[in-house]
Amino acid sequence: MLLAGVRYLATGYTDSLFVLCIFSAFHGFGYGTFHIGVMRYIKTCVPEKIQLKAQTMYSGVGYGLGSIAGSSISGITYDLYGLKSVFITAFLFCTIAAIVIYLFIGRKKSTCEV
């Protein structure tokens, strides 16, 4: 999450194609690690008979609700404050999400307690 946030911040403040390519790789790595982490959590912590439902919920909320909310928030932010503020807002959301994940999940010794 934090790598994706850094990518958004860099995207908002650079016009260099090279820098954009480097930070796009950060975004891909951030997405990949988050996705693998969620899939691993579902595999190890969710009872086997409802794992498919858990993956469906993750996909529906992440790609459905997340896309709707993200598009709406970025559109409103763009209208009110301009293009750079969209990337700053994305950075802030990613940073807050990374902190929440660390505080509530990342520090627990047992991987299946939430």
Image: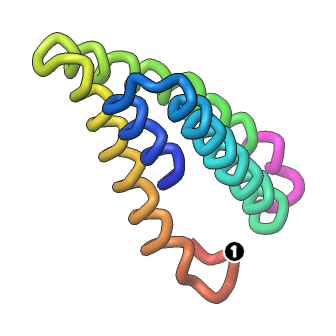
Q: Which residue is drawn at the image coordinates 20% and 21% (left, top)?
A: 77
Residue 74: name its quadrant: top left
Q: Which residue is drawn at the image coordinates 81% and 49% (left, top)?
A: 51
Residue at image mark 1:
112
Q: Is residue 82 left or right of residue 14?
A: left
Q: Is residue 7 left or right of residue 36?
A: left
- Image: 87 above or below 113: above
Determine if the magenta segment contains residue 72: no
Residue 10: name its quadrant: top left
Crowding at mark 1 (Cα within 10 Å: few <14, some 14-19, many 20+): few
Number of labels in the image equals 1
Residue 58 lies, in percent from the top left, at: 65, 40
Instruction: Find the magenta span and give its range.
Output: 46-53
Residue 73 lies, in percent from the top left, at: 29, 23
Determine if the magenta segment contains residue 47: yes
- Disc 1 is placed on an element classified as loop
Residue 13 lies, in percent from the top left, at: 32, 32
Query: Which sits in the foreground, 39 or 51?
Result: 39
Query: Which sits in the foreground, 86 or 106?
Result: 86
Q: Which residue is drawn at the image coordinates 53% and 82% (left, top)?
A: 107
Q: Which residue is drawn at the image coordinates 57% and 83% (left, top)?
A: 108
Residue 99 lies, in percent from the top left, at: 40, 65
- Badge 1 amino acid: Cys
Identify the colour scheme used. Answer: rainbow
